[in-house]
């Protein structure tokens, strides 16, 4: 009787959909703008990205490694173990806003981002760098240098760049929470579209499989 059970188990495993074991991983390394701060997690753009991939039959799972308040230094400190654990094929790096808001050294910020990108590449992962902008009250010189840091890194390391995650958001209560910094749930589809425009060309071809079950 036990041998029959073993045979049935082997048959069941052999018949399991192949895509379940072949899924690639997209790792999002970000701050509160990617961690769905102040809104329901399922309404954040990262979760919407997983839904978009599933609906379009892309065989990826999305891991959200974003933490509210994260700096580039914090992201760098956490990154190596995450790479080893999740072995992503694509890494979306959305960091730097908190460095800028705290007036931290932009040279250090760029170096942290550079190391994150290089570590990802050493693991043969593609990288999408997501840029940010600062409010004008931080001074023209600092804000311009902050924004140009992403563009320079993108050119130097030859990685795709989304210049500004929140491009297209209106400065009103519909798109921003009470702090005027964090996007509302209504704004998340806009963030998704901004990311999708740069991410889609990096994805592997669609696979003719059934939609992947919810994680």
Image (tube, rainbow, N blue to C red):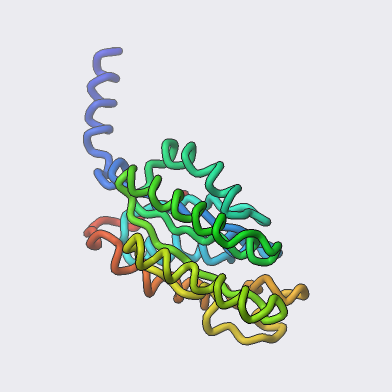
> Does 136 appear above or below 181?
below
The image quarter in which residue 11 lies:
top left
Q: Position of residue 8 (x, y in %)?
A: 26, 26
At x 24%, y 43%, the residue is 18
At x 22%, y 59%, the residue is 208
Closest to the observer: 211 or 150?
150
At x 38%, y 74%, the residue is 197
Answer with left or right where residue 88 lies relative to residue 33: left
Q: Position of residue 131 (x, y in %)?
A: 50, 69
At x 30%, y 41%, the residue is 21
Answer with left or right where residue 64 lies relative to residue 186: left
* Quadrant where the image shows the N terminus: top left
> Does 88 appear above or below 102?
above
Closest to the observer: 66 or 104?
104
Residue 155 at least partly seen: yes
Answer with left or right where residue 36 lies relative to residue 88: right
Say how many tags the image has. Answer: 0
Q: Position of residue 128 (x, y in %)?
A: 40, 62
> Residue extending furthest right?
178
Q: Position of residue 203 (x, y in %)?
A: 29, 61
Residue 214 at least partly seen: no
């Amino acid at each position: 009787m036990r041998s029959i059970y073993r045979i049935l188990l082997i048959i069941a495993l052999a018949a399991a959909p192949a895509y379940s074991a072949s899924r690639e991983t997209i790792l999002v390394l970000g701050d509160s703008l990617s961690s769905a701060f102040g809104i329901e997690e399922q309404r954040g753009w990262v979760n919407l990205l997983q839904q978009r991939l599933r609906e379009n039959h892309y065989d990826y799972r999305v891991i959200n490694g974003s933490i509210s308040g994260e700096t580039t230094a914090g992201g760098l400190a956490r990154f190596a173990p995450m790479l080893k654990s999740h072995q992503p094929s694509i890494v979306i790096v959305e960091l730097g806003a908190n460095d800028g808001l705290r007036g931290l050294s932009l040279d250090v910020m760029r170096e942290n981002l550079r190391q994150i990108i290089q570590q990802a590449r050493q693991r043969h992962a593609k990288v999408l760098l997501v840029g940010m902008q600062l409010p004008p009250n931080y001074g023209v010189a600092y804000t311009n240098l902050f924004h140009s840091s992403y563009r320079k890194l993108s050119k130097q390391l030859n990685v795709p760049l989304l210049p500004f995650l929140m491009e297209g958001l209106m400065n009103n209560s519909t798109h921003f929470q009470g702090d005027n910094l964090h996007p509302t749930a209504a704004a998340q589809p806009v963030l998704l579209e901004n990311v999708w425009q740069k991410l889609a060309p990096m994805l592997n071809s669609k696979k003719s499989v059934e939609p992947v079950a919810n994680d």
